[in-house]
Image (cartoon, rainbow, N blue to C red):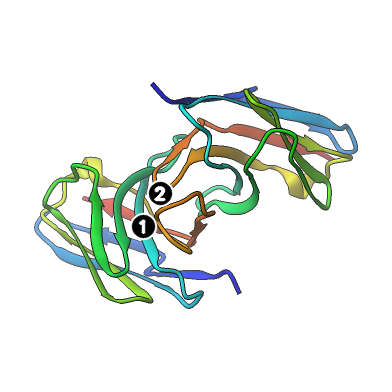
Amino acid sequence: EDQVTQSPEALRLQEGESSSLNCSYTVSGLRGLFWYRQDPGKGPEFLFTLYSAGEEKEKERLKATLTKKESFLHITAPKPEDSATYLCAVGTYKYIFGTGTRLKVLA
Amino acid sequence: DTEVTQTPKHLVMGMTNKKSLKCEQHMGHRAMYWYKQKAKKPPELMFVYSYEKLSINESVPSRFSPECPNSSLLNLHLHALQPEDSALYLCASSQESQGAYEQYFGPGTRLTVT
């Protein structure tokens, strides 16, 4: 059965303290892996798509990487406005979502 | 522009009411989706429209009725809902439904069933 697991479930960082979020997956043939950011009560905001192992994408303080078994979302020198839930998903029209990592960045 | 709009933002309805949620995108996307999201859970897929035709119904109860009037609009008609249907309803769109394309989500409609 296809599965996506995210860790940690919750993470508290001090402003400027870099860290990584993990998304491990078990799927029969990865077509795409997607990262989203979701603020409370709002829709997920698209961040990155990764298609093949070794691929990396960056946007401001965020960098997403992909291996054959997992993806990491690296957050460099985070700011309080980076606080959100980060979701990863795999699939095509039907996403298999992880349960998310709730990130809190303290000033 | 990667914007998907949804109206209303909030909706409170009784169990005997009929209401509709609306979604619009102007990105030329040919696939549109409805999701339901409960607190602290990831979104759950409800329906997929591809080229204005319903292609996926994830065994959603008939009290939820989707409609795609044209390639830019998606509606979700609600009737005789239950309190457990209270949730955030999200609309999304993507370039196509076949293939791994990123989905762009709207801000959601917070639905409360009393």
Q: Which residue is mark 2?
A: A93
Quadrant position of the C terminus of chain A in the picture: top right
Q: Which residue is mark 1?
A: B33
- Left or right: residue B57 versus residue A66 is left
Query: Considering only vertical position in the picture, is B3 above or below B44?
Result: below
**Residue A68 at x, y = what percent?**
64, 26
**Residue B40 at x, y = what percent?**
47, 35
Q: In percent of the image, x 83 and y 52: which residue is there?
A: A60
Disc 1: which chain? B
Query: Considering only vertical position in the picture, is B35 above or below B107?
Result: above
Q: Residues within 10 Å of mark 1 (few under 14, many from 20)?
A: many
Do tag 1 and tag 2 residues touch (Cβ < 8 Å)? yes
Query: Considering only vertical position in the picture, is B107 above or below B1?
Result: above
- Left or right: residue A74 versus residue A99 is right
Secondary structure under the numbered disc 2 in the rendered image: loop
Query: Considering only vertical position in the picture, is B21 above or below A75?
Result: below
* Alpha carbon distance from label 1 to label 2: 9 Å
Q: In percent of the image, x 32 and y 62: which residue is there?
A: B50
